[in-house]
């Protein structure tokens, strides 16, 4: 009798909710399955690689979506991952699927849980979970959201891995507007990367993170430039960020300056920062026009935070908007920590 009741219940749920029974079964199975966390950087053993996993995901998801909503694999440049020792690393060379979730007449909601409930996101999430199960990937709890309302990563994220590959789905609550057609939308991304790439990022970034005390598991770094013993870093959280100048002394990096604006010229002089490495600074006694006579003949205006960056409409439109201008390179840094591809 109990089995008959359960069978009838699963037949009635789709009729009452409008959701497919396949999606419900996937969600129940995924949330109730005992969590398995593999957080090692051992030598590569076996398992499906990142490109193959992304292809499987693309084929499974695209067939469930209208033609206009389908996508192709691209190369991504930002994969954020919390390691087994609690450090956050940012790796490159990812395989990326980007799905645009158009809102139509539904309006805009900034609530993460409401974005996750969007019908197209439910389809994408359901197929993602199904493919991860098929490929025998295990859930990584540390890099996954607990539930759709958990905003500790800002986005809703589910991460899975096997011996050689890591894949995650990120449902972002950011509101986008495509400049070419002015359509309102959200964006959901699926990324896969090899553990070999993650290990390379870890080996490069972990010593710097420890030297600068960025060990809270929330700070990601991007090395902008190295010159002798000096290093210029972008330090980002999931949404905001700043830049840091540091100098290596006795084998360890020591911070010189951190912020979103240019440092005082005295900071650069006191630390013997070469002009060839960084020459954007200001003299505080000059209230209107701030120049850098000791390092550069180029003026800097305090009332223009985007000086030396060509900030315009559309900059970082696919990366959460503009965070700040990296004056040293003349490039816009986006809210997800990447440089704008066009500004």
Image (cartoon, helix red, strand yellow):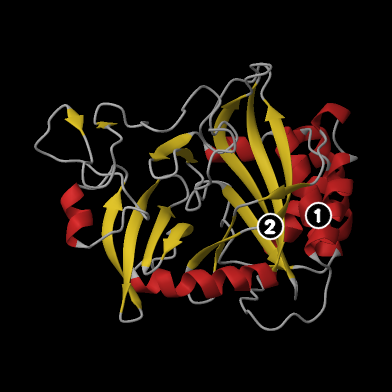
| Residue 34 appears in the figure | no
The reply to whether residue 330 is in sight is yes
Judged left or right of residue 194, residue 171 is: left
Where in the figure is residue 260, as x and y percent of width and height? Answer: 32, 44
* Mark 1 crowd level (few <14, some 14–19, many ≥20, 10 Å Cα): many
List the residue tagged with mark 2.
Answer: 93
| Badge number at residue 115 | none
Can you say whether 128 is above or below 12 in the image?
below
Mark number, residue 54: 1
Which percent across, then down, holds residue 98?
72, 41
- Residue placed most toward the observer, 237 or 324: 324
Residue 44 appears in which quarter of the rendering? bottom right
**Image quadrant where residue 341 sits:** top right
Position of residue 69 measured from the top left corner of the image (x, y, whole percent): 80, 31
**Of callouts 1 and 2, which one flags the residue occurring earlier in the amino acid sequence?**
1
Q: How far apart are marks 1 and 2 (CA)?
A: 13 Å
| Closer to the eye: label 1 or 2 | 2
């Amino acid at each position: 009798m109990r089995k008959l009741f359960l069978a009838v219940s699963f037949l009635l749920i789709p009729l009452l909710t409008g959701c497919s029974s396949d999606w419900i079964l996937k969600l129940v199975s995924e949330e109730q399955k005992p969590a398995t966390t593999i957080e090692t950087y051992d030598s590569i053993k076996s398992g499906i690689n990142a490109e193959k996993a992304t292809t499987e995901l693309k084929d499974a998801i695209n067939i469930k979506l209208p033609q206009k909503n389908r996508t192709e694999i691209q190369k991504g440049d930002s994969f954020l991952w919390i390691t087994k020792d609690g450090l956050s690393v940012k790796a490159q060379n990812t395989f990326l699927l980007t799905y645009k979730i158009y809102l139509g007449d539904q309006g805009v909601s900034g609530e993460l849980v409401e974005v996750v409930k969007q019908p197209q996101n439910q389809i994408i999430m359901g197929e993602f979970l199904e493919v991860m199960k098929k490929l025998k990937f295990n859930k990584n709890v540390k890099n996954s959201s607990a539930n759709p309302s958990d905003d500790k990563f800002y986005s809703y994220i589910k991460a899975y891995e096997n011996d050689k590959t890591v894949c995650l789905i990120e449902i972002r609550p950011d509101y986008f507007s495509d400049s070419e057609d002015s359509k309102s939308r959200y964006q959901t991304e699926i990324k896969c990367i090899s553990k070999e790439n993650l290990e390379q990022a870890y080996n490069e970034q972990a010593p710097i993170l420890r030297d600068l005390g960025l060990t809270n598991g929330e700070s990601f770094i991007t090395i902008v430039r190295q010159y002798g013993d000096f290093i210029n870093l972008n330090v980002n959280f999931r949404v905001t960020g700043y830049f840091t100048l540091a100098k290596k002394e006795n084998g360890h990096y020591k911070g010189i300056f951190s912020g979103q604006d240019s440092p005082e010229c005295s900071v650069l002089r006191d630390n013997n920062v070469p002009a060839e490495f960084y020459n954007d600074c200001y003299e505080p006694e000059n209230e209107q026009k701030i120049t850098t006579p000791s390092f550069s003949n180029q003026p800097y205006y305090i009332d223009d935070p985007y000086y030396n960056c060509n900030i315009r409409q559309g900059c970082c439109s696919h990366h959460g908007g503009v965070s700040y201008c990296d004056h040293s390179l003349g490039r816009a840094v986006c809210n997800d920590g990447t440089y704008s591809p066009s500004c």
